[in-house]
Image (cartoon, rainbow, N blue to C red):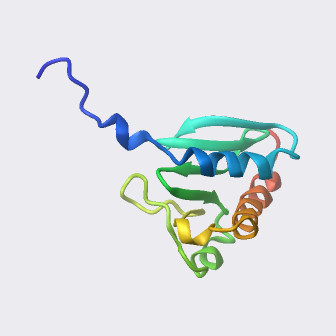
Amino acid sequence: MYGEPVYDVTAMAYDEELAKRIATILAPHDGLTERKMFGGLSFMLKGHMCCGVTASDLMVRVGPDAFEDSLAQPHARPMDFTGRPMKGMVYVGPTGYVDDESLAAWVERGVAFATSLPPK
């Protein structure tokens, strides 16, 4: 029908508990902001995305140099939000971040890349 949205807003939901866990890990970092993007919530350090949440997946910006190594890790796959893999970005399924230690390790991969970029 005319005027009806053509997208499903429920598809934009994300795991809020995971977002809280990520925010706790990132809290000590300066310049932390949150931004809605990719149908979920992204965490930015000084304007550069480092990681985020879409549905129940963790998304991590690892950069092109760490991309292949990241894909070799259990429960990781290329981020394909647009239907085409995004080089330097990975999704990690829920079993890949079950405990705080594994989540922190993935988040720190994103932090390492984001903090390697020049200031915005």
Q: Is residue 31 left or right of residue 5?
A: right
Above-or-below relation of 111 to 43 = below
Q: Position of residue 66 (x, y in %)?
A: 68, 71
On the image, which quarter does residue 4 sit in?
top left
Tell me what residue is drawn at x 57 percent, y 80 percent.
Answer: 74
Q: Tell me which corner region of the image, top left, top right, bottom left or bottom right, holds residue 101.
A: bottom right
In percent of width and height, residue 69 lies at 65, 79
Is 8 on the left or on the right of 46, as rendered?
left
Q: Is residue 10 above or below residue 93?
A: above
At 82% from the left and 52% from the top, the residue drawn is 115
User: Which quadrant: the N terminus?
Assistant: top left
Q: As drawn, is 52 to the left or to the right of 21? A: left
Position of residue 74 in the picture relative to residue 112 (left or right) = left
Give residue 88's position: percent from left, percent from top. Answer: 60, 63
Between residues 17 and 70, which one lies in front from this camera angle? 17
Task: Depth check: give the residue in front, 83 or 28.
Answer: 28
Residue furthest top in the image: 3
Of residue 72 and residue 27, the one placed in the foreground of this image is 27
Q: Is residue 67 above or below residue 29?
A: below
Q: Position of residue 39 (x, y in %)?
A: 46, 42
- At horizontal 36% and vertical 39% (from top left) the residue drawn is 10
- Count of picture labels: 0
Is residue 61 positioned above or below 77 on the image?
A: above
Check the picture and name the quadrant holding the C terminus. Answer: top right
